[in-house]
Image (cartoon, helix red, strand yellow):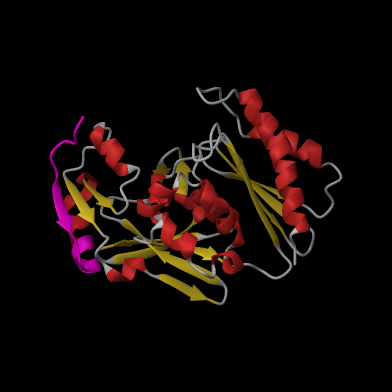
Amino acid sequence: MKPAPFDLVAATEMSEALEALHQGGTEARVIAGGQSLVPMLNMRLARPATLVDITRIPELSRIETKSDRVTLGAAVRQSTLERWPDLADRLPLVHAALPWVGHMQLRNRGTVCGSVAHADPSAELPLCLIALGGSVTLRRRRKTRTVAAQNFFQGMMSTDLAPGEMIASVTFPTRQTGTGYSFREVARRHGDFAIVACAAVARPDDTAALTVGGVADTPCTLELPADTADLDDRLNEFAWHLQARDDLHATARYRRDLVRKLGRATLKEASSCRD
């Protein structure tokens, strides 16, 4: 199939993109990499009247760093981040997760913010953003707001994005001294959507957090105290709390087993990686 007819605005300035989104309202969509949106257009699951191309806006292609955070503009491609020399040192969790994001060809076109905007519950980058306590900066014609990642994702492919609004950037907190990070995933084939993906953060005070994607409608986090003698019981309770469902890829029981076993292994690896 081919997309339904639409108007294309190839914006070269942020103000131009925001004005087009304001004018288009609910019938306007942003396009950058198009790895999620274009298939939806072709299958006519999405039928916007206006597409706003943001790839020609220079400020949206920047990776900006500060001592405690890294901010990625909406047009930063996944492959650009993957090749960024400071990635492993500044964002070790994202460095571990990126090779699992689709395939190399998809990462060459797909953007980090595009994956966040799509909000697939199996996607690795939204999982990392939540696990690290990141945030999403949203802009419209006369307003800018920043939303914590855990509040931005509201359900399966559902976010806090309002009509006339676009993701301008996402911000990841950087590596903290004495903290260990780990990412693990199980999929039918490498590059497929995750059946279960786990991101673990082990802190200097021996507390830890496990964030799991691919099971519930959004990635969910289990906070663990320093004393984890009952870890197996906590993981079992968490696995049931996620309310896994059977689908074409895996049974609910298999997903629960993965949360228990993969979760434990990911936490153990994160704890061993603390510097």
Q: Is 14 in the magenta?
A: yes
Task: Point out residue 213 in the picture as x, y percentages from the top left corner.
Answer: 56, 41
Q: Is residue 260 left or right of residue 11?
A: right
Q: Residue at x 16, y 36 (%)?
A: 4
In the rendered image, the vertical position of residue 65 relative to residue 221, given as above or below: below
Where residue 185 sits, quadrant-wise, is: top right
- The N terminus sits in image quarter: top left
In the rendered image, the vertical position of residue 142 relative to residue 49, given as above or below: below
Q: Is 55 in the magenta?
A: no
Where residue 27 sits, quadrant-wise, is: top left
Q: Residue at x 23, y 61 (%)?
A: 18
Which segment is the magenta one? 1-17
Q: Residue at x 60, y 57 (%)?
A: 93
Task: Point out residue 45 in the picture as x, y percentages from the top left corner.
Answer: 28, 33
In the rendered image, the vertical position of residue 66 relative to residue 52, given as above or below: below
Task: Point out residue 274 in the picture as x, y percentages from the top left corner.
Answer: 75, 63
Q: Is residue 176 left or right of residue 33?
A: right
In the rendered image, the vertical position of residue 134 relative to residue 153, given as above or below: below
Tell which residue pokes out farthest to the bottom in this image. 67
Q: Nearer the viewer, residue 40 or 153?
A: 40
Q: Is residue 150 visible?
A: no
- The C terminus sits in image quarter: bottom right
